[in-house]
Structures are given as structure tokens and as C-alpha cells.
Amino acid sequence: MSDFIRNKFLWLDQVAADGDLPPTVARLAIVLCRYFNRESGSAWPSIERLARDLGIADRSVQRMVKLLIEHGHLEVDSGGGRNKTNRYCQIIKTATELSPFDDENPDAAVTLSNEEPRQDCHPLTQERVTICVNKPRQDCHPNPLKEPFEKKDAGKPAISDFRKSSLEPISLVPAIPFIGRGAAEAEQLETAARGASDLEADLFRRGKEVLGTNAGGLIVKLLKAKGRNIALARAAIETASTKQSAREYVNGVIRGSPEAKTAADYKAEARARGDAW
């Protein structure tokens, strides 16, 4: 097994072992590993592509990336403009906490390999290792068909060891052997991650059926109002489907109205009583 592949497994095992992270973050880590480049050690998929791969909203991906950064598993260099993607680097917690994107810090960016050192490789530090080579930024377009290839055939899609082609259907949760964990425990983690994400994707699908295809932002607000409890948010959407104005009902739930009755509901009740409206 090459150092490149071994470091991916080490990083995935590290993320999976972090009990403070929700299980869906492990799925994001798995998908990110498909995009890491063997030459630079970094990846640059767009938020939109990661969201499509995972079947969730863009903001959910942004929140999970933020959690990986806050827990010290990921280093991100912002793209800094429209149509420019972020650059991601794995962090294995065995070396000094230094940014691999700091040009004034030659010891920060390192690569772990038994191959002959390149000119852009630097000595290992003491406490933490960032799997990234400090190379000049490449302007990357969100379209993966225009992203640079690892070694040759420039202009073709960036293809990692986990994907044969960016055009082929892929499993969102591949079976990955986590180092240092039993097979049963690794399978349990993958099942939990798959289940949580599938429920969230189904929530958005059903929400758009009831509230309209452009209701993604409203569904995110509802999920937040319910403490990210997918079951409670789904129950609110099902109740909304019985109302004359589903959107008004959901907005009432988000505002914290006890009954979340809409103007249409009150009007219907008045008509049932024979009152003038």
C-alpha cells in the first residue's frame, strides 16, 4: 500500500474516532478522499459538487467542512472569488499545528512518502502532519471535467483511487477498512452515516413536494428550528401538507407559533362556523 493511500486511511480513521462529530461528517470525509490529488496532496472540489455527491444541501456541506476545521482534521485555503473553489488538505494529528498555506512557513507543508523528495517537500514537524504540498494555486472551475488531472493528460477530470471516472455512478459510502477498528464497528459507523444522510435527503425531497421546488432554504430553517431533528421536521412537513397554505404553516412553526395556524386556517374555521370573514 502506498503512503498516499495509507494516509487516507489514517485520516479517515482519525475523523471516525472523533466522538464529538456527527456521523454525517464521516461521509463527507470519505467523499473528500476521492478528490485528493496524489501529486499535491490537496483537493479542490466545489461545495456544489460535494453536495451533489452526498445528496444534501450546500449549507449542510459548509457546516460539516466547518466542523472538520474546528476539530483540527482539515486545513482549507479559501478560493477567494467567484468560480474559484477552496483547496482542502488533510491533517493527521502528529505534528506541530502550522498552516500549510503560509508561504513564510517552510516547515508547515509536508508530504509523507518513501519516494525521493521533490523540491517542494519540506521536513516533517513534531506534533502534526498536514498532507499537502505548498504549491502555487491553480484556478479551478467547479466543473470537475475541467479540473487538472493528477499526473498526465492535463485537462481531464481529477480522478482519485476511489473513482474510475467522474462520469460513472458511484457509491456514496464505499466500504473502507478503518485502521485500528474492528470490522463490525466500521460497518456500524458507515451504516449510521448512510442512514442519517438518507433521511435528510428524503426530508428535502418530501419538503419540496409539499412546499415547492424552491423551498430548500425554508426546509433548512425548519430543520434548524427543530434542533436538527429530522423526524420532527418531517412530521411538521407532513402536517403542512394537510393545510391550505403549507408554506404559511411551516413559517409559523419556524417562528415558534404553538399551533402554527395560518391565515387560511383561520379563514376556513370561520367559514365552518358561518362567521363573516
Image (cartoon, grey):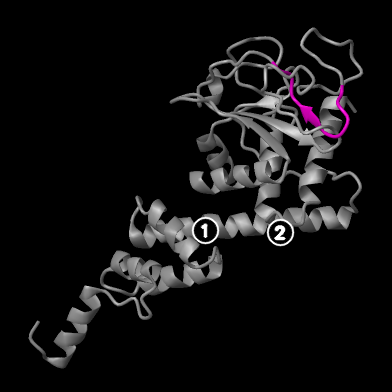
Residue 171 is at least partly visible in this image: no
Residue bounds of the magenta highlight: 124-134
Q: Secondary structure at mark 2?
A: helix
41 or 172: nearer the eye? 41
Name the residue at the front extreme: 104
- Residue 31 coordinates in the image, percent (x, y): 67, 39
Number of the label disc, if any, that sits on residue 112: none
Residue 221 is at least partly visible in this image: yes
Residue at the disc numbered 2: 192
Q: Label 1 is placed on what type of residue?
A: Asp
Please report the residue visible at 42 percent of the width from the left and 68 percent of the height from the top: 237
Please report the residue visible at 58 percent of the width from the left and 40 percent of the height from the top: 53
Q: Inspect the magenta stretch and tell me whether residue 131 lies in it.
A: yes
First along the sequence among labels 2 and 1: 2
- The total of numbered circles placed on residues is 2
- Residue 127 coordinates in the image, percent (x, y): 86, 34
Locate residue 14 relative to residue 245 in the image: left or right: right
- Residue 79 coordinates in the image, percent (x, y): 53, 25
Q: Label 2 is placed on what type of residue?
A: Ala
Please report the residue visible at 51 percent of the width from the left and 71 percent of the height from the top: 232
Nearest to viewer (mark 2 / mark 1): 2
**What type of secondary structure mainly makes up the magenta span?**
loop
The reply to whether callout 2 and callout 1 are in contact (CB within 8 Å) is no
Residue 139, compared with residue 55, is above or below; it is above
Residue neighbourhood size for the residue with mark 1, other residues' Cα within 10 Å, grouped as few (<14), some (14–19), many (≥20) = some
Please report the residue visible at 50 percent of the width from the left and 25 percent of the height from the top: 80
Q: CA distance from mark 2 to mark 1?
A: 15 Å
Number of the label disc, if any, that sits on residue 202: 1
Q: Secondary structure at mark 1?
A: helix
Q: Quadrant of residue 176?
A: top right
